[in-house]
Amino acid sequence: MAEQEAGSEERKHYFVSVQAGQILEDPQAAAYELEIIMNENEHTKLRELFDELSSMDEAEMFHFSHSPFGSASDGEINAGYDQLIERIYRQLYEFGTDTTKQHIESMQFF
């Protein structure tokens, strides 16, 4: 059990495309924007945020395709989306390489 816990703390390099919602181990597998270093537990948490973002996108499409005059305003929907994107970028900043941190800082996101 102790070996398993120690193994989950091992930090690895990952390559992230926020637009595609991808976290890759192989930088050659697809285009990516940012490089981060994190352990398995941190990877799982970031993956969950990307899954939540994907679900939100699908829910918005469903909402507007079935009810173009729905009760939720664009502002309300966008606010939730913006908050989730900010949470993702905060995690990317926390685990980012120096280059990644500089890139996120240049975006003046937070």
Image (cartoon, grey):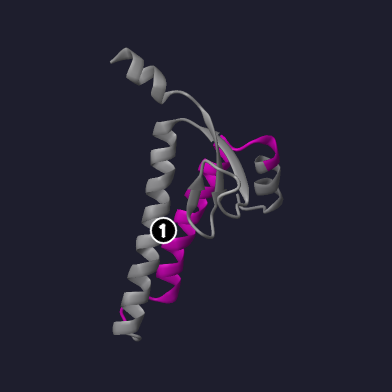
Q: Where residue 103 sits: x, y (%)?
A: 69, 47
Instruction: Left or right? Give the position of 14 relative to 5.
Output: right
Residue 107 sits above or below residue 73 on the image: above
- Mark 1 lies on a secondary structure that is helix
Q: Which residue is mark 1?
A: 53
Residue sitting farthest toward the front: 28
Q: Which residues are magenta?
A: 70-99
Quarter that holds the N terminus: top left
Side of 72 relative to 11 (left or right)? left
Is residue 100 inside the magenta stretch?
Answer: no
Question: Magenta: predominant secondary structure element?
Answer: helix
Residue 78 lies in the magenta stretch: yes
Instruction: From the viewer's side, name the closer residue of 67 and 37.
Output: 37
Task: Say which residue appears at 39% left-offset and 76% top-offset.
Answer: 73
Residue at left offset 34%, top offset 83%: 65
The answer, for residue 72, to whether it is visible in the render is no
Identified at 40% across, 21% down, the residue is 7
Callout 1 environment at 10 Å: few (<14), some (14 to 19), or many (20+)? some
Give coordinates of residue 58: x percent, y percent: 35, 68
Identified by mark 1, the residue type is: Leu
**In front here: 105 or 27?**
27
Residue in the foreground of this view, choosing between 15 and 28? 28
